[in-house]
Amino acid sequence: MSTVIAFIVIFGALVFFHELGHFVFAKRAGILCREFAIGFGPKVFSHKKGETVYTIRLLPIGGFVRMAGEDPEMIEIKPGYRIGLLFDKEEMVKKIIINNKEKFPDARIVEVETADIERDLFIKGYAEDAPEQLQTFRISPVANIVEDGTETQIAPIDRQFGSKTLGQRTMAIFAGPMMNFILAFVVFIIIAFLQGVPSNDPKLGELTPDGVARDAGLKQGDIVQSIGGAEISSWQDVVEIIRKSPNKPLEFEVKRGGKDANITVTPKEQEVDGKKIGIIGVYSPVEKSPLQAVKFGFDQTYFWTKEIFVMLGKLVTGQFSINMLSGPVGIYVSTDTVAKSGIYYLMRWAAILSINLGIMNLLPIPALDGGRLMFFAVEALRGKPIDRQKEGMVHFIGFALLMLLMLVVTWNDIQRFFLK
């Protein structure tokens, strides 16, 4: 159960912050965001606040922000339609009732002559209470269309995704992967604040309760000046000498509280990868400082970004088999393994997954953020956007292929971990 909770929290957080990036920059650009969803499939939870419906859906394999203009917008109000109109205090239309008008006794019934709910925001028609007079009714830019009891806010053209500048659209899409990198960076900083940043100073870190160092009299914070007569200048020097001396007494000269002390320690023998090495039960020293934590966050984010790109390169060149890829099942199993090592390892794993999600979404594959950014790049070169229907077809095919890949990877994971 703890693994299930850890998996849901980690995966949910990665998706949430990814979609939050899209959401925040879309709102900054003035785009109407109809829905902020975590997961796909049927709704499990739904809450509307302001213009946006916040939902949690059944299948926790992703999420989305539904922006106005990305899908076909609203129904078309054609001449001859009989609709109901409700008005606000400024006598602007606040609700357009398409059917079931009997449920709105206060609505004014109008036979439509012409209507525009995207650009000029008006309805012209003949009202039942004045059938011989053609009237023009102004529509509020935040009016709702009511159909089958469901209210949907209209999206004037200036609130739609496609009406925004290339830069605004690009940022709204790029912000998702960007947030994954920022999340990883922040998580690494938090780890560094809580756990400390590894230091190369020749100072003893925490001692294990059952280690020979503690039994011999060494203490955390001792500064090692020499070992067996060899001068020590870094933690790496300490590690190398100890590893090379299993079962050999070593005289440590340390400075403790401004005073020198000589302590003899005999490293315990341990076999690692077929080699016998010495250990004394001392962790490396750590340093806790804001600057070091920020540097650690940057270094770790850069390191794992580079490592993931190296693995992608091996996949492209055939050095890395598709059978070695992991999907949600593989991630769950790995999360179970990592969770047993402690909270810091779990946090580090979450940060690595976040970087991985950011990079995967930036790949120029249709249906992913990178695929959409690729179309924006083509638009910038052409000076005009690609036909929306053609782009939509490319994204649809890309999404279908991604789902097929997901099924293959998931089946491979099931075989690897559960059908051995």
Image: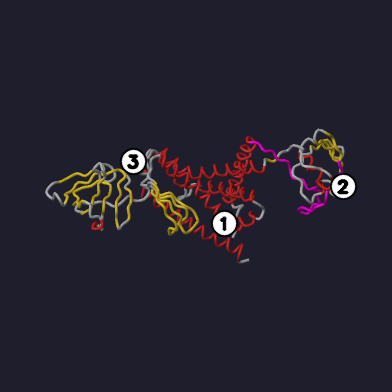
- Percent position (x, y) of residue 2? 60, 58
Q: Amino acid at mark 3?
A: Asp
What is the distance, in whole Å, between disc 3 and disc 2 at their CAs? 77 Å
Q: Amino acid at mark 1?
A: Ile
Q: Is residue 313 magenta?
A: no
| Precedes in sequence: disc 1 or disc 2 | 1
Would you say the residues marked 1 and 2 are in contact, meaning their CB atoms lie under 8 Å apart?
no
The local crowd at label 2, few if under 14, some if 14 to 19, many if 20 or more residues have their Cα within 10 Å, is: some
What residue is shown with label 2? 248
Q: Which is more toward the observer, 186 or 358?
A: 186
What residue is shown with label 1? 5
The quarter of the picture where residue 137 lies is top left
Residue at (66, 43) in percent of width and height = 195
44 with respect to 342 (left or right): left
- SS under mark 1: helix
The quarter of the picture where residue 200 lies is top right
Q: Is residue 284 magenta?
A: yes
Residue at (45, 53) in percent of width and height = 398
Q: From this viewpoint, is residue 26 visible?
A: yes
- Percent position (x, y) of residue 266? 86, 47
Q: Amino acid at mark 2?
A: Lys
Q: Which mark is residue 158?
A: 3
Specify start and end residues of the magenta stretch as a single range: 263-289
- SS under mark 3: helix
Q: Which mark is residue 201?
A: none
